[in-house]
Amino acid sequence: MERRAALVAAVVAAAGLTACSTPDSDRPTPTTEAPTASPREPLSACAVLDQLLAGQGFTPGRPIGVRDECGASKPGYGTVSITLEQEQGEPAGAAPFDVNGRKALIGQFTGPGTCEVVLDVPGHAQAATTVVLLSADLQAEACAAAQDLAISLEPLLPR
């Protein structure tokens, strides 16, 4: 009986993890409900990015640079990345806003067709989502995609 209950629980969990969202555009959207992070378990930028982009046609996440940053690309779309760091500083020209009750900043920090959202993780670090689209004319789309990714990332971050 215990084995059957464990099997049923595993099937239910697997079904929940494979639920898909219906995107309105090519913007990255979460495909699973993400559990809140445990403060004892460090997050890996690539593991988180792969989880959030699963099934959307992006390449597997690859480490970028020396910090905990990971990027993935999608042909014909552009690239997205997540950075998890101790302190990134406040980018110039950032506009404050809120992501699920968490302080955040949003802005175009690196050029046309790009947008970054920096989330505050009190007493710990910052997390950022960055979207770089292939067309510089799509600034609003880049910021909408960065916001969507930040909204998906936020529940995974420690409070």
Image: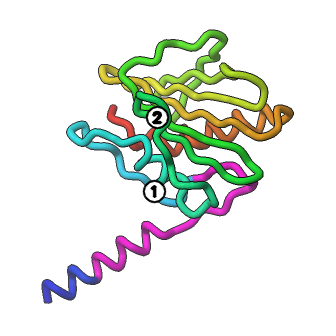
Residue annotated with mark 1 = 33
Element under disc 1: loop
Question: Horizontal and vertical percent for residue 61?
Answer: 50, 48
Q: Which mark is residue 134?
A: none
Label 1 vs label 2: CA separation? 22 Å
Question: Horizontal and vertical percent for residue 7?
Answer: 25, 83
Q: Is residue 148 above or below residue 67?
A: below
Q: Residue furthest right?
A: 137
Residue at screen point 66% across, 11% down: 93
Answer yes or no: do the residues labelled 1 and 2 have beta carbons within 8 Å?
no
Q: Residues within 10 Å of mark 1 (few under 14, many from 20)?
A: some
Residue at screen point 42% across, 25% down: 126
Element under disc 2: strand
Residue at screen point 78% across, 33% down: 140
Camera-nearest label, 1 or 2: 2
- In the image, taking residue 76 as reference, residue 67 lies left or right, namely left
Residue 71: quarter of image: top right
Q: Which quadrant holds the N terminus?
A: bottom left
Question: Horizontal and vertical percent for residue 110?
Answer: 68, 21
Question: Horizontal and vertical percent for residue 79?
Answer: 65, 42
- In the image, taking residue 11 as reference, residue 30 lies left or right, namely right
Q: Is residue 47 visible?
A: yes
| First of labels 1, 2 by sequence position | 1
Task: Residue type at mark 1: give it.
Answer: Glu
Residue 158: quarter of image: top left
Task: Residue type at mark 2: give it.
Answer: Glu
Residue annotated with mark 2 = 69
Residue at screen point 29% across, 82% down: 8
Region in magenta: 8-29
Q: Which quadrant holds the C terminus?
A: top left
